[in-house]
Amino acid sequence: MKRFLVALSIFFASASSAACANADVSASSSEPQQMQDFNIVGYSSKGQKTWEVQGNSMDMMDNEVKISGITAKMYGDKENMVLTADNGRFDKETGMVHLQDNVRAVTESGAELKTNTLDWSQKQQLITTDDKVNITKGNMSADATGLSVKPDLKEAKFEKDVVLTIDEQKKAEDSQKPSVFSQKGKMVITCEGPMELNYEKQFAVFEKNVKVEGDAEQGTMVSDKMTVYFSPATKQIERIEAQGHVKIVRGESTSFSEGAVFTASDKKVILTGRPKLMIFTEEGSHVSP
């Protein structure tokens, strides 16, 4: 089929962006315009290319552009990202892009996002979805329902039903160094949400009914809120800080406290705020204040 090239120069100096098209169609026409194999390019107010959208077909009606077979490239200051989806639509007036069906985003640093629907605000530089979503980077994989994230995927807020899986063994194998936290497998952290994950500053904050499950040696930790810090060098867990109704189960012993700090280097836990330890033996349980 004949290939069309549509160049849209979009300036974001104000809330109502101006747009112009270099093609043999009228963008303001009330009659729908159809195109096959197209390319749309967006520019900042300084003339820098900020995004580019390619597609198999495009239907234009007033300010809305419907697209199928989408490949979108987002050009950031520090990192670029490629978005793909089966279908989507673009609002030329607001600059909002909605993608749906097999939505996938991949960054240059290896982060990958998968979901079924996604909204991309060029003005706010924010990606959001209300659907189930997965983000994977390195040895971490996060699943949740609902997400808001920066285009480079380095700052993400997962709304609810969060599951973060940390494969310390995989990271140790990739780096050819033993993990200071676990050499036996995976750690899974769940919470009702929200959870904020900052890949750049290397920490994650979990809210509401947080639960950490590791191997038999690590045990299980439950709390109201939990902050996990990662090593910038190894990307492995450095420290875990738990707050509110903390419960730790290790083997035959259970401890209760208002706070706890776990350090990975020595695998020690410091309990704070009325700590209580219950040790179960053959003779029965023993409670230590």
Image (tube, grey):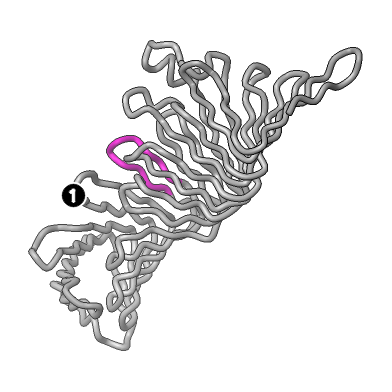
Query: Could you tell me which residue is drawn at 34 percent across and 53 percent down?
Result: 150
Q: Quadrant of residue 214?
A: top right
Asked if residue 214 is positioned above or below residue 14 in the image, the reply reads: above
Sort mark 1 into few (<14), some (14-19) or many (20+) by Cα contacts within 10 Å: few
- Circle 1 — which element? loop
Q: Is residue 72 left or right of residue 226?
A: left
Bounds of the magenta segment: 104-113
Picture quarter with the C terminus: top right
Where is residue 250 drawn, in percent x and y?
70, 22
Assess whether residue 193 is covered by the magenta stretch.
Answer: no
Picture quarter with the N terminus: bottom left
Total residue callouts = 1
Asked if residue 127 is positioned above or below residue 155 in the image, the reply reads: below
Q: Please state which of residues 32 and 223 is positioned toward the viewer in this rendering.
A: 223
Assess whether residue 106 is covered by the magenta stretch.
Answer: yes
Badge 1 amino acid = Asp
Q: Residue farthest to the left? A: 46
Q: Residue farthest to the bottom? A: 30
Q: Is residue 152 left or right of residue 216?
A: left
Query: Could you tell me which residue is drawn at 58 percent across and 41 percent down?
Result: 163
Where is residue 27 drawn, in percent x and y?
23, 80
Q: Residue farthest to the right? A: 283
Residue topped by disc 1: 77
